[in-house]
């Protein structure tokens, strides 16, 4: 199974996808005249200016739901894997894909707002919706919807819960071993799996609004606490700060693990973490209540900065400053070995060891706690995304039980991921991310050449901002954007 997963990963995450992610980010950065820089202050303002409604959530709630999907195990275990397999230089390429990816995040999220729909009293949208409406290709939209349900409902939750199970086991021990149908398992992992699944069931059966309310409280609090601890560790080792920074930059261009490895792992884990171009963020963006589609596009672009330039960078510096990492070479060899050979790079171990070395007795439990909140809220975001695509498919196929099947499936995959080995979990997660990224990036590039909806929306927003309007409006017909039925109806009213 692992061999098959790794082989399939090799095809999906070929150099073509690596350069597609980087190329699309650069392409949209140039087209928007680097919107991620020009509108940085506006992103901050918009974060706290929006309000929720009976049909939609606020911009901040949408950001929190989106961040709950972005800030997860990728920020802790994913960064460790990037360093472990790509060397310290992989961190630099994570920064590059985040900076460029912020423009991609604007494009996909603005598109989601433009082509969103009101279904059963709630706003719904995402790549499947804008592929159908902007490209007129229902078959392509169905493929994306099915791929996303499989990715977010079955494959990606295993990565989040797996890292959490490993972190709990490392922090508190394995406990007694239990014989199960999955083999011999530690009681720590089994109890963790049961607890996560019960809590997950309570929230997902409570609906989208409950997910939004939960994440808007938990995500900012835990992310802030994590960054404070990281900055404290960096502050205590400030004499090594510039040495580590020099290591990251120098290794990015003359990498110890090879140039392809540094770029490949940096981009792969960067996209896995910040999700720019993957097509997951637009689902939360579409659910927001805003006056103009460009506003939520800008808010979602800012979330990429929070995820990679803040949280991922905090993790990377904690690992590198404390020297709590290995760099894997060919086969079973090591280019750098600071830790025992049996410590997995595809796990939160590097981060836990690094924090523990500075905060003895507190480091490992703190990382496990952070990972619990990060991973759990990410699984909630995955359900939110998968459900949006179930709703999309049900517009055509009318399968009432599909939503219930999704809820049971995501709970089962979460349990499975918690108790199984890390390599298979991460392999499945990479397949899921790569599959969605291929489908979504190709779609938004083609959309640009056909209609340019997100670019037109940005230009319209800039013009209204320069004119000093107090209440922004969006008229898709005036801008030559077709099939934006939600905004057409709002304009008529």
Image: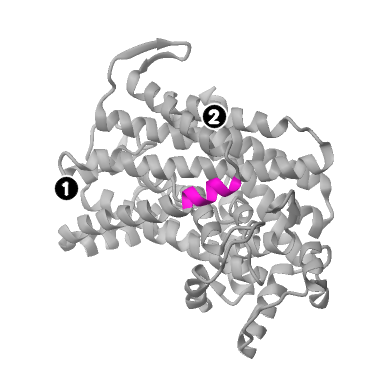
Structural crowding at the residue carrying mark 1, measured as other residues with C-alpha within 10 Å and reported as few (<14), some (14–19) or many (≥20): some
Q: In x, y percent, where is residue 406?
A: 64, 32
Q: Which residue is mark 2?
A: 411
Q: Give the quarter of the image for residue 78.
A: top left
Residue extending furthest front?
Answer: 54
Q: In x, y percent, where is residue 4?
A: 57, 26
Residue range corresponding to the magenta coloring: 208-215
Q: Nearer the viewer, residue 53 or 179?
A: 53
Q: Is residue 204 above or below residue 114?
A: above
Q: In x, y percent, where is residue 314?
A: 32, 56
Q: Is residue 27 magenta?
A: no
Q: Secondary structure at mark 2?
A: helix
Q: Nearer the viewer, residue 314 or 241?
A: 314
Structural crowding at the residue carrying mark 2, measured as other residues with C-alpha within 10 Å and reported as few (<14), some (14–19) or many (≥20): many
Residue extending furthest bottom?
Answer: 467
Q: Nearer the viewer, residue 310 or 192?
A: 192
Q: Is residue 214 magenta?
A: yes
Q: Is residue 2 above or below residue 232?
A: above
| N-terminal label among 2 and 1 | 1
Q: Which mark is residue 358?
A: 1
132 lies left or right of 66: right
Q: Give the quarter of the image for residue 133.
A: bottom right
Residue at 21%, 55% in the rendered image: 233
Quadrant that contains the N terminus: top right
Q: Is residue 146 above or below residue 297?
A: above
Magenta-highlighted stretch: main secondary structure? Answer: helix
Q: Give the quarter of the image for residue 105.
A: bottom right
Q: In x, y percent, where is residue 232?
A: 21, 58
Question: Is residue 424 visible in the rendered structure shown here?
Answer: no
**C-beta proximity under 8 Å, tags 2 and 1:** no
């Amino acid at each position: 199974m692992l061999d098959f997963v790794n082989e399939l990963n090799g095809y999906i995450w070929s150099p073509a996808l690596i350069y597609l992610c980087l190329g699309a980010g650069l392409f949209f950065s140039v087209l928007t005249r680097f919107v991620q820089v020009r509108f940085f202050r506006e992103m901050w303002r918009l974060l706290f200016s929006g309000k929720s409604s009976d049909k939609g959530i606020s911009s901040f709630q949408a950001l929190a739901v989106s961040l709950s999907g972005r800030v997860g195990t990728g920020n802790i275990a994913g960064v460790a894997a990037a360093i472990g397999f790509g060397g310290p230089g992989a961190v630099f390429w994570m920064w590059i894909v985040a900076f460029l990816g912020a423009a991609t995040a604007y494009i996909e999220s603005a598109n989601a707002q433009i082509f969103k729909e009101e279904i059963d009293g709630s706003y719904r949208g995402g790549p499947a919706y804008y592929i159908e409406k902007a490209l007129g290709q229902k078959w392509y939209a169905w493929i994306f919807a099915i791929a996303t349900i499989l990715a977010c409902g079955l494959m990606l939750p295993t990565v989040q819960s797996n890292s959490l199970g490993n972190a709990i086991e490392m922090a508190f021990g394995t406990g007694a071993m239990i014989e199960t149908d999955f083999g011999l398992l530690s009681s720590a992992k089994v109890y963790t799996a049961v607890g996560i699944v019960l809590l997950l069931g309570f929230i997902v059966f409570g609906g989208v609004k409950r997910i939004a309310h939960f994440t808007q409280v938990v995500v900012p609090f835990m992310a802030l606490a994590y960054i404070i601890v990281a900055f404290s560790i960096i502050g205590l080792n400030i004499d090594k700060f510039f040495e580590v920074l020099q290591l990251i930059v120098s290794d990015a261009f003359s990498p110890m693990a090879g140039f392809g490895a540094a770029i490949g792992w940096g981009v792969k884990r960067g996209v896995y973490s910040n999700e720019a171009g993957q097509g997951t963020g637009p689902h939360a963006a579409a659910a927001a209540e805003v006056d103009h589609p460009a506003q939520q596009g800008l808010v979602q672009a800012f979330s990429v900065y929070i995820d990679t330039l803040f949280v991922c960078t905090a993790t990377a510096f904690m690992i590198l400053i404390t020297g709590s990492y290995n760099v894997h070479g060919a086969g079973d060899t090591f280019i750098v070995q600071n830790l025992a050979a049996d410590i997995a790079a595809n796990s939160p171990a590097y981060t836990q060891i690094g924090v523990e070395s500075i905060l003895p007795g507190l480091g490992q439990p703190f990382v496990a706690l952070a990972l619990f909140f990060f991973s759990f809220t990410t699984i909630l975001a995955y359900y939110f995304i998968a459900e949006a695509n179930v709703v999309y498919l049900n517009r055509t196929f009318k399968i009432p039980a599909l939503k219930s099947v999704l809820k049971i499936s995501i709970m089962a995959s979460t349990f499975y991921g918690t108790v199984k080995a890390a390599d298979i979990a991460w392999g499945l997660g990479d397949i899921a991310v790569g599959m969605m990224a291929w489908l979504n990036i190709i779609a938004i590039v083609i959309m640009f050449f056909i209609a340019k909806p997100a670019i037109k929306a940005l230009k319209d927003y800039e013009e209204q901002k320069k004119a000093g309007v107090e209440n922004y409006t969006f008229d898709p017909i005036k801008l030559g954007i077709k099939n934006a039925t939600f905004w057409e109806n709002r304009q008529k009213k």
